[in-house]
Amino acid sequence: MIKYLLTFLALLGIGYMFFPLVMEFSTPTRLNPLAEAYVSSSVNDLNMPNVVTAIVVSYRGLDTLGEVTVLFLATAGVGFLLRKRNHEAIFRRQGSEILRIGASFLAPLIIVFGVYIFTHGHLSPGGGFQGGVVMASGILLMVLACKEFSFSHNLIHFVESLSGVGYVLMALTGLLLIGFDSFLDPRFLPKGEWLSLFSSGAVPIIYSLIGLKVGSELSSVIDSMQTGGEK
Amino acid sequence: MVNPMIILAMFLLAAFATALIDKLSRMLAIGTMYVVFALAAGLGAWQLYFLQSMPDAQTMVYSAGFPAPLSIALRFGVVEAFLITLMNLFGLLGGVYLFKRFKEHGAGAIALYLAMLLGANGLVLTRDIFNSFVFMEILSISSYALIGLKQTKNSLIAGIKYMLAGGLASALFLIGVIFVYRFTGTLNIDTWIAMGNIPSAAYLVALFMVAIGVFIELKPFPANGWALDLYQSADSGLAAIIASVQTGAMLFLFYKLLPLFIPEMLNIFAGAGLVSFVFANLIALRQKDAKRLLAYSSTAQSGLLVFVIAALYLLKLPDTIILVIALGLFFTNFFAKAGLFWLAGIVKQDNLSAWGVLKKDSGLLIIFGVFVIGLMGFPPFPAFFAKWHLVHIFTATKAWIWLAGLLLGSLLEVGYLMRWLGFAVKQEHPGELSKSFSKMLAPMISAIFLTTASFFLIKLYPGLGAFNVYPLMALLLFGLVDYAPAKLKGAIAIGVLSYWAWFMLLPSLPLMGQVFAVILVGGSIAQLFAFMRYNGAAEGFFPFLTMLVFSFGSLITASTTMELFIAWELMTLASYMLILRGKKAKDAALLYIVFSTFGAYLLLFGLSLMPSTYPGYPLILQAGFLSIGWVAALFATGGFLIKMGALGVHYWLPSAYAEADDETTSILSSVLSKAGVFGLLLILMMISSYVKSNSLSMIALGWLGVFTAFIGALMAARQEDAKLLLAYSSMSQLGYIVVGLSLMSHLGWVSALYMAVNHLFFKALIFMAMASVFLRTGTRNMYEMGGLIKKMPIAFISVLMGIIAVSGVPPLSGFGSKWFIYTSLLEQGRYLQAGLVFFSSAIAFLYLYKLIHTVFLGQAKPNQSHVKEAPIWLIIPQGIFIMAIMAISMFPNLITKPLSQAVGNYIAKPDWLSWDGYNIVLNSPALHGNWNGNLVMYVTMGVFIIPLLWLLLVNAKTQKVKQFNIVFAAERPYKPETTHYAYNMFAHYFKALGFWVEPRATAFYQGVSEWTHSISATLARIYTGNGQTYILHIFLYMITLYLLLGVR
Amino acid sequence: MPNLFALILLAVLSILAAIYAVLTKKTLNAVIASGIISLSASIIYLILAAPDVAMTEATIGAGLTTVVFLYALKHVKGGEDD
Amino acid sequence: MSITLKLIWAFISLGVVTVWGLTLNGIVQKIFARVQGRLGPPVWQPFIDIIKNNAKRTAITHGIMFYLGPVFRIAGGIGTYMFIPVIFGSVYFSNFSMSGDVLLVMYFIFFGQLGMALGAGEGGHPYSAVAVSRGLAQMTAFEVPFALSVISLVAQYGTLNITEIIAAQQGGFLQWTLFTNPLAVIAAMISMLGMNMYNPFSVVIAPQEIPIGPPTEYHSSFLGMLATNRGIFAGAKLILFMNLFFGGATNLFSLMLKTFWIYMFSVFVGAAYPRFRTEDSIRFFLKYPTAIGIISILLFTL
Amino acid sequence: MLVLISGVLLIIIGIWAMLTRKNIIRIIIGFSIVDTGVHMIIVAIGYIKNATAPIIDSAVNTSSDISGAVHVNSLIVDPVPSALVLTAIVIGLAVTALLLSFAIRLYKVSGSLNIDDYEELKW
């Protein structure tokens, strides 16, 4: 009883705390100076239409690097916790014939779509993360549909590691080629044409690496979750 | 300068590539990780070096080629470089410790561990608030995942609790961040700070949420149930890193945010930190599980650090001071806490009392001792200096509650840590240690690092003289040769100490200092012979004995309050270790150290109120013209009185004296207590300008002394244990010294000092003789002995001389001290006090007779027929002290004149006090009297020798008879046990006076301890173990703080 | 204006789904409900002119998270309900 | 005065007090006997006892301390006496009183008692230890009022020097402490009852009475020495009291008179009262006489 | 504004779930609801009235000045919160996945997911 009361009080208190935040809020009508600066710098310095991507990959690239690491950690952690105890066959229900054929037809398409998303991250909405997830969902589809489907763990790890290393090396390249403050600076490659695929310096490359990494990481998360350290 | 991005990139590369490298070779993967840590630490050190040569160098680094706030900025200044070096060093050590785990679990574990350190490094470096969030998550998630190293039920549920708490904290943090962004339009911390405070309730709430997010990660009481379970159940190696690296990084983030907080917020966080410090320590007090205790202790320490940085920030102190203090605490805490967790992994025993297994490896035991003592803030560890300055700052700013909380928490901390140390040193346990090179390396290196750093710190600390290092050097050197035979070590120690005392100590001191040097140092050296009686190495004596004696030297020569306090603490520590060496001394030593620490804190507070002194001149020289306020004097006096065992705070004394090794007790009683006298005298000198004999305070002090003497004597008469009896006797005698000092007159101080010298002689003499008796009979209960006069005549003569001297019967010097006390008291008109002193000195006869009769006279016990005289090493000091007593009895001027001269430097000798040959003549208007010790000696010898000759003449041939040849009503006794009237000898006396000997102090302190434990137990109830309740705690805690903040 | 209407609808939907997720007895339903929350959230983001976020929320929040939950449910058969 | 002469006079004075003390003891025994309706021994009986005891051939000893016990005892008696000026104004009868003041005397009294207790202790007889424990316990109690009355004298006269205290009491019997500070004297006299160990404070010697009489284990010349001491010590104490409270004595005759009556006081009380138990006597001493002593001090300080 | 309020409500509901549901999986669901609420708040903060997505394509009104620098004239939403929320969502997924795998292991080790069954570590 006392616990319910305290829970109620806690919820009430949280509401009370949020109250000023909500009350004083009014939707702004114009951008704040920092956002303005981002927009103009993105367009002018990086030649990148998608300002969000500009921020994610370049200005606040360090966050993204960290984010990729977080995902990497989750993968490692989940794999670590749910690693296979022994090698007994895992019971998995076979999907129906139609599903299997459909899946093996669709999956490559989905993966290609994922690749499209992350290579065009600097131009259109989406990017490495979204593309990575789409890729992973292609693999998920295969996993669901086909009993005998098993992808090479080594390959996944290889892709994951290499893309991660590549990402960091890209970041370091900026430092080496441009200057002291230029860790993660994509401008060591030419700006390129406005709205073309190979523009905005190294952004497409970086985002592709992120996409590959995220895709492989999420695939192995799915794989780990699916097997669940089954005995 | 070093680009910190390189460090981050290095970690990332290694983490990402681990999976591949692991495929090649696991050892290579582990090796790569170690190399990364080493490189990162090296880069940090390099940066430190760089900044040292170029202090004004630019330390801000941007990413992506744009300046902040567009991009993310990192700062790599001095503090950051220091922390980076430290943390990576730690990462390396912790990594080595976890070597086996890595070998077992492979790439995943390695990558997670690397990422954890990456998160910590990033958190320290970054100046961007959202980036902090990201690194915080890296740090947290990697530690979450690593908990899976140990997949037990407890560890898994602890992991879930931890993740939920951490996740909620970061959610709060994130909401706060985004709202602050809304108000400031930036995410860069420096830009925020530059913008100043924004007058809006919503902004405040947002700020509060940012702060509380970080704060909850710092595990404040009571919203820290999850953290406790985590520490308790996680792998020790991991807990070590979480307690040190993770907490350190979070603390630094909190520190970075401080400039944003409004004063009310600082106040609340300081208060919450303090509450956490005090209460977590309080609950830790009753823990029996080592890792859970460490958990409480860790949360307490992080509470302390939050409190310190917030409080100091609130007091608007310069950043450098805050950092120096916080880093001092942090540095010690970092090494010690992690080290203790590591040791917990080696010991593998959860129950505190099982930590006795540490005894199997004395190296580990020493390491453990270093950590525990460092954690408590004893000198020379950095935490000591931090606490010293903290107390001074709080005193200067009159922050009394903070000061009280700080000291209270520290006292509780001392309580449980020392209890633990006691278990480790004293408790026997059959278990095994899980030792391996990789596991031993980390605690070993951190202990060495901590000690070395501390050693240099005290050596280089501004304003500390060389003398302060001697005790530590002695500890170290004698510790290194502790395997040598005791006789060799004893000889070396006596030689070195004598040389030092004669050629270095004495010449540097004024007369009064020399008097104390003779008492403290000389008295100890004479007793060192006794320790040479041990066969073999007798480990554990000489390092601490020499440390103790050297610390006496630094105490007397101290020229600043800091030097005084350092010497005092080192002295306490050394004596504690010596007491702890006794067979059953675990509890007694704990009691001693807790009381001593309490006293030390009183003293610390008193000292913090004192004016600055002139470094280079001994305080005892300066005391004559320094003047301090009465509050300072009151507290410092309290501290010193505890060491002297004054009535009311004497609770520790009997057990500590009784349970220490016999030779140690002798030093404790005859020498160590005089250190308290020294301190008290010092204080009285400093208030002599305005406090006189007839001041109320001094009359009260006098009564305190008198009652100490009275109750001490009564209690002594009641004991059956000879050491307890002597312990209470010491208490009683120190009461006389307090009375003498309280007189604030020339004669009074002379009498106190005379008593001090005398007490040294006769108490050491009796203790040495009794040590021989205990050694030979193997018991301390007097009624189990009897008739030993025939077996141990030398011991009997020593005790006889001793008790004559104690009782004050002429012609021995004891009468001199009685004469001085009465005349000085009567001269000042303290008639009633003199009356009670007389009563107590009469009671002394009771216990003295009991001592000598039941042990040496009466019926000899058959099971003690083998008893023989003690080894020569115990007899040498007896000889020295008998000669000393005879000398000053025969020629009192040897001592009375120098004492009078020494006191005369502070309180001028009155004209009415004069020496006429050996006759001391008192012609004060209030009192006439005289005493000619020399003549009394001759007369006594005359009246003794003449009847003796007569008796020898008429009764030369006496027939020796057997033991039972006594005239006994109609029947022959046949058992010495029933014929030896010894047990409860003064039953009738206590029937009459029972009221005065009821153990009130015992009842009081037991009550205090019981209450403390009950409160502790009640508080601990909030940790129900239910993860959901813990989440509720977090929210309720947050709301409480929010309401306290009172945002409008 | 239709935007606003849609917004209100989605917000109410997500809150109702959340309440349902708390109150329902079956954990599976709760998982689905939380997927619905994410899905409606992603549409809200789209309306709020944040297409990148919308995509991410749809793929990760509504998609992957739900899948992960479902896998988890599969592994804890028997212990998943209150 | 040369040291030789001093020594000779000290011996003479010692002889005087021994004879007088023993005679007083004899008289007291006689009085007790008469009070109890017996004929009693002759007044010179103590002298006969001493001579007889010293002449005994056989002697047994339990050890060195046992042997030294009587020596300590008599040294305590003689020493105490030696530190007291016997006759006011007489250089011959001032003994060695220049070596200290009344504190010295008060503490030297313990010398003999302690030594005796040790000697008796080595005898191995439990009753000795019982007696010592009672004696010491009672002593701590009765010394309190005595010390308080001495302190009261200090408050009154401002000196600890016995000669100076006597000097302050000269000029008619109204100057005696008995009349100038009656409360202190009452306290001191009550405590003297305890010191002399007559009834009601005789419980100390009770255990020794049961088998064969006082000093249980001592005999022959040991006993002779103890008996001699009874004379000396009694005399010394009486003279001390006389000096402190009754104006001292300027000649031998007044010394005898005063000490006789002081002694008789305790004898009369002793003959009239039954024996206290130890705890009762302790309580008694710590109540009334102590209170009286404190009051007498307060009267002189306020 | 509306989105902000629903975000706050989601957070409170999520916390409610965390505080009252006994099943660990349900608590984790509560946690993910809180996360969603937080994300919603962040997006709501970045919104600007009548603005378009922060992608400078043909739909956006731009102009160039003499030096060639491009100015964006029409309103677009604040890109910063969008960027932050991307990170936050990924991190949320990571934590949720990890929590779930802990729960799975816990269930495998001791066969219960009721949080009240795990009260061994206390006091």
Image: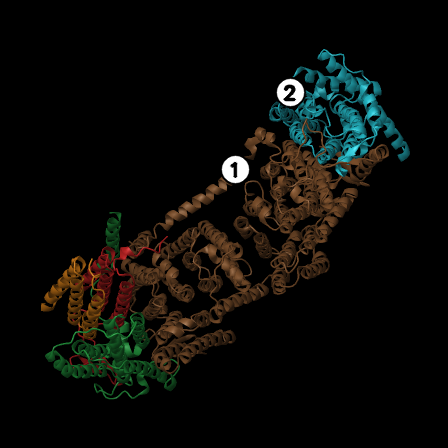
Chain colours: A green, B brown, C orange, D cyan, E red
Relative to the observer, which residue lies in front, B856 or E118? B856
Q: Are dots 1 and 2 in contact, CB under 8 Å?
A: no
Position of the C terminus of chain D, as image quadrant, is: top right
Dot 2 falls on a residue whose secondary structure is: loop
Residue D275: image tag: 2
Q: Which residue of the protein is positioned furthest toward the top in this rendering?
A: D37
| Numbered disc in front, either 1 or 2 | 2
Q: Quadrant of residue B573?
A: bottom right
Residue B11 position within the rendered picture, expressed as x and y whole percent measured from the top left:
39, 77
Write down the residue under mark 1.
Answer: B1000
Residue B229: image tag: none
Taking B545 as reference, is B792 above or below it? Answer: above
Residue D189 position within the rendered picture, expressed as x and y whole percent measured from the top left:
69, 22
For residue B369, side relative to residue D88 (left or right): left
For residue B740, side relative to residue C44 (left or right): right
Q: Chain ID for label 2?
A: D
**Residue A43 visible in the displayed image:** yes
User: What is the three-letter code of the residue carrying label 1?
Assistant: Arg
Q: Which residue of the protein is positioned furthest toward the left in this rendering?
A: C2
**Residue B198 visible in the displayed image:** no
